[in-house]
């Protein structure tokens, strides 16, 4: 693969992370204050909402870092190696973690949507869940294909 292509993908990975960072800095505290105004009788709802989004951001950034590492392995001609399979496994785990967190957070989204009479909030959460599941399935398929390619390569290396 051309180094220009992987450089472009590395820049794209960085630019994917920047809007989420901006959301975490500027929007998540506002969402917490909004939830506190909507549900004043639920104690610490503001901190629960903020903690939920920040905890969900951690596996997102871990997956982005692993994608960046995977692109580095491709640059170094180590695409067909165990470390690439491990990176895909971590990406799959992170995507599953994000899906699981948002599934567990659906009641929280429901309470906020019910108080604000905005069902679109639940739809946004469902989109995030299904997008993360798609990424997890895609990473699992790539992981399996890469592992099979590595196995075939090692068999061919042993064959004279």
Image (cartoon, rainbow, N blue to C red):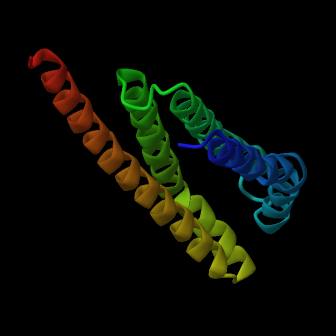
Tell me which residue sits at (60%, 59%) in the image: 108
Up-down: is 158 above or below 130?
A: above
Q: Position of residue 29 (x, y in %)?
A: 86, 51
> To which quarter of the image does residue 90 belong?
top left
Task: Please provide percent x and percent y for residue 126.
Answer: 51, 69
Q: Residue furthest left?
A: 160
Q: For this view, does 92 lie left or right of residue 70?
A: left
Task: Report x, y in % for residue 153.
Answer: 22, 28
User: Which part of the image, by quadrant, shows the C terminus?
Assistant: top left
Which one is in front, 122 or 128? 128
Identify which residue is drawn at 54% across, 69% down. 127
* Residue most extreme to the front: 160
Task: Give the image location of residue 148, x and y in percent.
Answer: 21, 37
Q: Residue at horizontal 17%, vertical 32%? A: 152
> Does any portion of residue 43 appear in the rendered image?
no
- From the viewer's perspective, tell me whether residue 130 is left or right of residue 118: left
Q: Note whether 105 is above or below 87 in the view shown.
A: below
Figure quadrant of residue 10: top right
Looking at the rendered structure, the number of numbered marks drawn on it comes to: 0
Q: Nearer the viewer, residue 107 or 60?
A: 60
Q: Is residue 107 left or right of residue 57?
A: left
The residue lying toward the viewer, choosing from 35 and 12, is 12
Q: Foreground: 89 or 6?
A: 6
Task: Please say whether residue 82 is visible from this viewpoint.
Answer: yes
Which residue shows up at 63% across the image and 43% down it? 6
Answer above or below: position of 133 versus 6: below
């Amino acid at each position: 693969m051309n180094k220009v292509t992987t450089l472009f993908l590395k820049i794209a990975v960085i630019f994917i992370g920047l809007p989420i960072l901006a959301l975490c800095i500027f929007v998540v505290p506002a969402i917490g204050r909004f939830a506190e105004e909507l549900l004043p009788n639920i104690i610490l709802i503001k901190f629960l909402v903020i903690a939920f989004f920040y905890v969900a951001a951690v596996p997102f950034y871990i997956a982005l870092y692993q994608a960046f590492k995977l692109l580095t392995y491709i640059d170094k001609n180590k695409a067909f190696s165990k470390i690439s399979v491990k990176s895909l496994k971590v990406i799959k785990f992170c995507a599953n973690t994000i899906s699981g967190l948002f599934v567990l957070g659906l009641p929280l989204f429901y309470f906020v949507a019910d108080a604000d009479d905005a069902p679109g909030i639940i739809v946004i959460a469902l989109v995030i869940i299904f997008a993360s599941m798609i990424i997890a399935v895609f990473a699992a398929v790539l992981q399996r294909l890469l592992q099979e390619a590595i196995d075939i390569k090692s068999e061919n290396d042993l064959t004279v």
